[in-house]
Amino acid sequence: MTVKINAEQVIEALGALAHEHRLSLFRLLVQAGAEGMPAGAIAEALALANSSLSFHLAHLTRAGLIQQTRKSRSLIYTADYAAMNRLVGYLMENCCGGATCTPNAACEPIATKTLERNDA
Amino acid sequence: MTVKINAEQVIEALGALAHEHRLSLFRLLVQAGAEGMPAGAIAEALALANSSLSFHLAHLTRAGLIQQTRKSRSLIYTADYAAMNRLVGYLMENCCGGATCTPNAACEPIATKTLERNDA
DNA sequence: TTTCTATTTCGATAATTATCGAAATGTGAG
DNA sequence: CTCACATTTCGATAATTATCGAAATAGAAA
């Protein structure tokens, strides 16, 4: 339990995930692993207008569930596994009055191809 | 993994929990244990108008996160721990491409006082 | 600098959601 | 049957959210 999370952040994250396209989008990035995906490829995969996708990407980013890095002209989005773990941790932590059942399964990103940054 | 859950149900549950009052409400019921709480007591605890609370109770019920039983004139609401576990299970299951990290911590309701129904 | 490409921001619109008071419903008591 | 109580449903209103095309921004290449 390195980083704390509060109710407000939990609500923001839950609300961000509680949408057909954003849930698909997040899981797409989770499966994409540490390499992530450029916005254009995501828009194509989800069959969304660029402007709509941008709206959802901003929403997930604001909720702290995904992150953005630039690679030449493309913006690469990656899932934030730590945030995912914190969210589930919060739900489980407050599950049984706060005592016994905390999740001991932590998710680590899958390095699909290039493993450039090992600073996680 | 006795009961399956699909994306649509997950979205409904996440959306139900992604609200200040409903998240507090759900956690209140979780802490209340198997005994549950009558609507009136919940409204008082959360300082909500009866009609507003009823709206949120219906929302959580529709999402399958809480259940309703009648006890004389009062309607008693209880948290559905199994639904909670299914939700977290879904999130974790699809966390690492679906393979390794599933949660092995399951939440059981706390029997605070009367343990009338053992058919869980 | 000019052009090309990727992505975001801006309007404008439609749909959904949250809120509360007042009225209605349903249950038990006298 | 009538009354009292707990909760829900009904309106009406305000706020938020999702959508997409068109225009603007940002970076890279020529």
Image (tube, coloured by chain):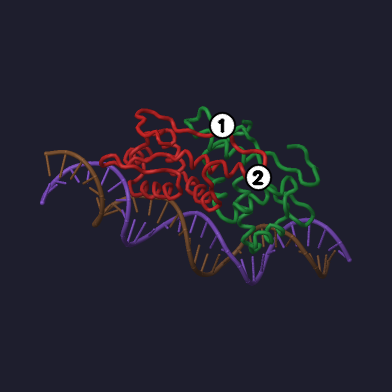
Chain colours: A green, B red, C brown, D purple
List the residue tagged with mark 1: A102
For badge 1, the amino acid type reads Thr
Instruction: Name the residue: 54% across, 30% down.
Output: A101
Element under disc 1 = loop
Tag 1 and tag 2, C-beta contact below 8 Å: no
Q: x and y percent of residue B2 in the render?
A: 53, 42
Q: x and y percent of residue A9 in the render?
A: 55, 42
List the residue tagged with mark 2: B98
- In the rendered view, tell whether residue C21 sits above or below residue B82: below
Quarter holding residue A49: bottom right
Distance in Å between CA atoms under marks 1 and 2? 20 Å
Instruction: Name the residue: 77% across, 57% down.
Output: A73
The local crowd at label 2, few if under 14, some if 14 to 19, many if 20 or more residues have their Cα within 10 Å, is some
The local crowd at label 1, few if under 14, some if 14 to 19, many if 20 or more residues have their Cα within 10 Å, is many
Q: x and y percent of residue B76 in the render?
A: 34, 40
Whether residue A67 can be seen here: no
Q: Is residue B18 left or right of residue C8?
A: left
